[in-house]
Amino acid sequence: MAFKLAKYLPIIDWGRRYKGETFVNDGIAAVIVTIMLIPQSLAYALLAGLPPQVGLYASILPLVAYAIFGTSRAMAVGPVAVISLMTAVAAGKIAAQGTPEYIAVALLLALISGLMLLVMGLFRLGFIANFLSHPVISGFITASGLLIAVSQLKHILGVSASGHNLIEMLHALVTSLPQTNFPTLIIGVVSTAFLFWVRRGMKPLLMKVGLSDRLASIGTKIGPVIAVVIAIIVVASLGLADRGVNIVGNIPKGLPSLSVPEFDLELWRSLLASSLIIAVIGFVESISVAQTLAAKRRQRIDPDQELIGLGAANVAGAFSGGYPVTGGFARSAVNFDAGAETPAAGAMTAIGIALATLFLTPLLYFLPIATLAATIIVAVLSLVNIADIRQAWAYSKADFAAMIATIIVTLTVGVEAGVLSGVVLSIALFLYRSSRPHFAIVGQVRDTEHFRNIARHNVITNPKVLTLRIDKSLYFANARYMEDAIYDLIYNKPEIEHVILMCSAVNDVDFSALESLEAINERLATANIKFHLSEVKGPVMDRLEKSHLLSQLTGAVHLSQLDAIKATSGTSHGTELDFHL
Amino acid sequence: MAFKLAKYLPIIDWGRRYKGETFVNDGIAAVIVTIMLIPQSLAYALLAGLPPQVGLYASILPLVAYAIFGTSRAMAVGPVAVISLMTAVAAGKIAAQGTPEYIAVALLLALISGLMLLVMGLFRLGFIANFLSHPVISGFITASGLLIAVSQLKHILGVSASGHNLIEMLHALVTSLPQTNFPTLIIGVVSTAFLFWVRRGMKPLLMKVGLSDRLASIGTKIGPVIAVVIAIIVVASLGLADRGVNIVGNIPKGLPSLSVPEFDLELWRSLLASSLIIAVIGFVESISVAQTLAAKRRQRIDPDQELIGLGAANVAGAFSGGYPVTGGFARSAVNFDAGAETPAAGAMTAIGIALATLFLTPLLYFLPIATLAATIIVAVLSLVNIADIRQAWAYSKADFAAMIATIIVTLTVGVEAGVLSGVVLSIALFLYRSSRPHFAIVGQVRDTEHFRNIARHNVITNPKVLTLRIDKSLYFANARYMEDAIYDLIYNKPEIEHVILMCSAVNDVDFSALESLEAINERLATANIKFHLSEVKGPVMDRLEKSHLLSQLTGAVHLSQLDAIKATSGTSHGTELDFHL
């Protein structure tokens, strides 16, 4: 029992061995992550179309829940860009931004996707995430990055413009250009330029003043905080809020109130698809972060337990005024670099954010929205991965097609349609490819026991015997292809008396393929051709023994291809056979 | 050009060599098939909810079109039971039986599914049919057979009762039992009993009177005609039509008028899904019949050309008052046994049916519906294949699950939902199974160059080197499983310095799997473990050379596993290595 509990509550394991030294390390990491997380939480809430405090709330209890249930030592969960965009899209379909219903829907999305993750974890359904192929995820993230960046341009310009896809957004931006607010534009452009410089120029500078590589990396991540502080001071001292610069304004002070999301069956049902996509995309992102960090210290990540950890984080967020969260790469890397040793660092970060919501919010009153938009733009442009598109093109045209389809549909139709069409296309392409398995007509390499493709090697064959080596497992999508291939090969060849199927590469024969083998056997029998199998693997043979195929087989099952040739040719020596190039 | 034309018009090929002797043989087969097809056409039109003449019309031009475009020498196309049921379901969703709209929708279904088949044939998309796995088709046919049989019981009882699924049908039958018409019931039961006897007892009887096995088989197929003739005589002479026995009544005399189906975009769109299912199910049935017959004479079936032949048949039917058709097994076997040598037999059958519509229809006036229903019931009960369900259970639980799900959904929800849920479940189960590929930790068999699973063989391993043999191609659905497996294996093993992935069974590495290999390489590098590949196949290596993996690989790619062991252990001899059970 205790063992089982520790599996589902990793905190028992690491908590038992928790030491004072670890506490100090976790604490330092927590302080740094907290400082980094405050502007991020506000910015991603803005992106999700939610009030700024919702971003902060989503960074408190979810972190505590993950600290209890998660297996990654250094992962920092909280609001992230792509999930915030998906929340905005899903909630926007049900209610208008700025309404209480919209906030309630965002909460419900966290709850439902959290519950889905919990169920997937408990029933070990994590493999569902495998159906998101890399081209689909990569294409989706790239397209989302572009969409998010464009969606923030309105805040840089200080105009109101909205749209559900790239074309609509660009159109709205262009038509609202004349309304540009210049003080906002200046703040936005300067913030963006500064943040880009932080990414590129700050680390070398910090290293020049003597900081170590690690500390300089961490320092770079504090860049957005510097931008936020300067922007607040400028806006407040120059009275820019009165000149049309949008500011964050009043953020309710204090901790979120615990609340129970409403249960409306119709509403839940309408959110199921969106919640599933949010859950799966969030999990894929998060597990990738967790595994990257864990491998550095040869630590272990249990994907099923990660589902539970992430699920618990989202459910906790849903009960404390938050919205969907997942593991973020940038902040988890900072947490790791800053020395976090256990999930306790996450819990301490939660305390930091809680303190910020209690005492810091009045200071954020004059924070210009344009600066938050700048932090989003700079963050998400790093998501756009053009190199990956080029590599996909070079590597595999099918994967490239899936990636491009995902990008185009995401940009022009929407994020959910983009993911779904990518998944469907990936599966269809995979099935198509595996429905045409490679097979070869083989002959015996002279003076050896080896059999090779007659198209590539100078081998000996017997015109009475046709041997086919199939290079893939047989299942419903390729069984008929094999049937057609065999019928084609015997067509107009009255000399053939034996067909041997060499199964050395066949790991599985499903019921459809069994049916095809039986059909081949029967149909060859009506044409007076004996059908043989050779080199059938153990597990496949175990299966076939449960069927009627073996008893009905007109030929035999031969342990080796050599045995098959001996049995069908009445000789073991190639010399008596005809030659074939 | 001529060569190409002959590919798309097989008639050019066989027509050129057509001889008088062949004409006689084809003609005899055509007469027998015509006699068999008349009651079948009427019965299946009844099953489809269409007037009897539509069944006859569907047996004229479609046969001519198939004779021109089809590749099977002996296949007889026309109305069949399962497709008739699917037509009734699809048309019933749009219009009420007995209305002109209903007939128009049936026509449109033939047109759209015919066009789909043509497109699939021209673009070589026949592989789409492969996604109907054998358990799904078998389950679907069994369930359809049950549904059809039950749906005909109302005609045997002489009551009106309808329903969209088995439960509704049975309920309607039971509540309408008190309305049973006894003369109808007697005709129905006697017809059914007679037809069952024909199936079992007539062939031995015919052989006893001296007929050959082949002639006796053909004679058996004429059984339904005998039932029809006797039933007509009984009903007409006893005046049973006045005692409540439903009869076929007046069938319009003469050939169908050529008509152009209406084009209503909304209506077409609503029929797309149903048409696709009818097209694919029809094709799967038909190709199976064609291949069975062709194999007996070592003839060749071109599946893509079969799509064109079947598509042309359906389009021809749509322009001449018919409804969806496909190749029927029973009548094709009769055609074959009766000696049909070329598709000309089909064209002659069409002439026979045309003559019947011109001159025979008045004789069918008194034909009782109950006798037609009996022919349907006896025919479809042979579709119910309980043995196959039992075999699926014995052979593979996953295939059994797909089969049972198809049967249950078809019976309780409907035919289209049944097929779709079966297809989705088959694909999901396949992806699930292939997402957990078998892999083995391998070691060297002492004093050999062979490497085997350490769990099964007594082999030598080096604790610094971990070799994994993966037994499947790597792609998106299983790549992360492999990643997890490798991370699990290095966890808490600080002694490991090298990980070798033995790729002897890997036929393909898609872009997602490449990403996983790169991630493994990077993550192992951070843990100071070198990552190697061994026994990579040629085509896979060609692919990998287009990626960054090989240049970034911390280890190397080794031609053989032995080379890999030599390179990583600094020795070629097992004797210096530790032993491992």
Image (cartoon, coloured by chain):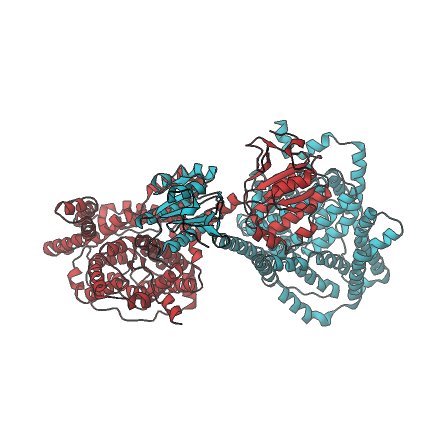
Chain colours: A cyan, B red
Residue B352 horizontal side relative to residue B276, left or right: left
x and y, in percent, of residue A100 in the image: 64, 53
Query: Is residue B349 positioned above or below B221 on the image?
Result: below
Residue B350 horizontal side relative to residue A74, left or right: left
Of the 4 image quadrants, the one containing the C terminus of chain B is top right
User: At 38% across and 59% down in the image, what residue appears?
Assistant: B302
- The tally of labels here is 0
Extreme residue in the top direction: A1
| Residue A157 seen | yes
x and y, in percent, of residue A243 in the image: 80, 66
Extreme residue in the right direction: A209
A388 and B553: which is toward the camera: B553
B467 and A287: which is toward the camera: B467
| Residue B107 seen | no
x and y, in percent, of residue A543 in the image: 43, 38
Query: Is residue B271 positioned above or below B188 on the image?
Result: below
User: At 72% across and 53% down in the image, what residue appears?
Assistant: A52
Which image quadrant for residue A337? top right
Which image quadrant for residue B336? bottom left
Extreme residue in the left direction: B237
